Image: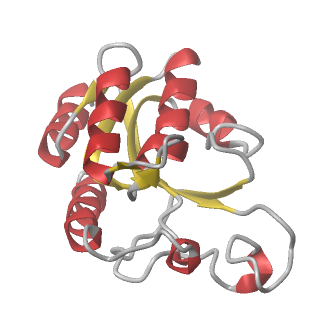
Amino acid sequence: MNTALIVIDVQESFRHRPFFTEHTLPAYLAAQNALIEGAVARGLPVIRVLHSDGPEVASNPFAEVSGQVRPLEGLAAFEPAATVIKHRHSALVGTGLEVWLTRHGVGRLIISGIRTEQCCETTTRHASDLGWTVDYVTEATLTWDMTQPDGSTLSAADIKLRTGTVLQGRFCTLCSVDEALQRATEAA
């Protein structure tokens, strides 16, 4: 079974959001880059997904005219097999990615990127519902603390734990970087 790595929304836009912090960025980038480099070394297609939405004005970091809808500094350089710009949470909505994956005989996806509980989780659920086998690499996803409705803080670590809990066994297999790469090798 052919496997593709999906790198979701790893873009400079996030540096311009008030919640952005760098404290977990180095560990995330180490895992994300190891996953990219491992996929490239195995000849797996790596798909770059970027997110653009909101008003198309320079002051909106998610507008293409802002210049921020580009790879995050520190992300390993790679030649994407395909690049898609999405305007929804799922990378499979309105991007043509579903068609590209089908045409290239991809049956397994490795999901990584930003944000853990938002676009990565949504793409995972959507891909599973469409019939793909999905490996979700939590350590190669990034998110930030969030404020809950009662005003308390939900930590990024707890968000990652919750996301893994609700996805595992229902929509995906949770994997480390090494496990995802090994599973891709075994599936080939």
Q: Position of residue 155 (x, y in %)?
A: 31, 51
Which residue is found at the position 61% from the left and 43% from the top?
91
Quadrant assignment for the N terminus: top left
Out of 29 and 107, give the one closest to the viewer.
29
Residue 137 visible in image: no
Residue 115 visible in image: yes
Out of 144 and 63, give the one closest to the viewer.
144
Which residue is found at the position 33% from the left and 74% from the top?
76
- Quadrant location of residue 25? bottom left
Q: Position of residue 63 (x, y in %)?
A: 76, 73
Q: How many marks?
A: 0
Q: Position of residue 18 (x, y in %)?
A: 54, 74
Question: Looking at this rendering, what residue extends furthest in the front direction?
Answer: 150
Which residue is found at the position 85% from the left and 80% from the top?
57
In the rendered image of this protein, does residue 25 appear above or below residue 111?
below
In the rendered image of this protein, does residue 68 appear above or below residue 79?
below
In the rendered image of this protein, does residue 54 appear above or below residue 154?
below
Which residue is found at the position 49% from the left and 41% from the top?
150
Give the color scheme: rainbow, by chain, secondary structure or one colour: secondary structure
Quadrant assignment for the C terminus: top left
Q: Locate residue 91 relative to residue 96 in the image: left or right.
A: left
- Quadrant location of residue 102? top right
Out of 120 and 128, give the one closest to the viewer.
120
Q: Position of residue 17 (x, y in %)?
A: 56, 73
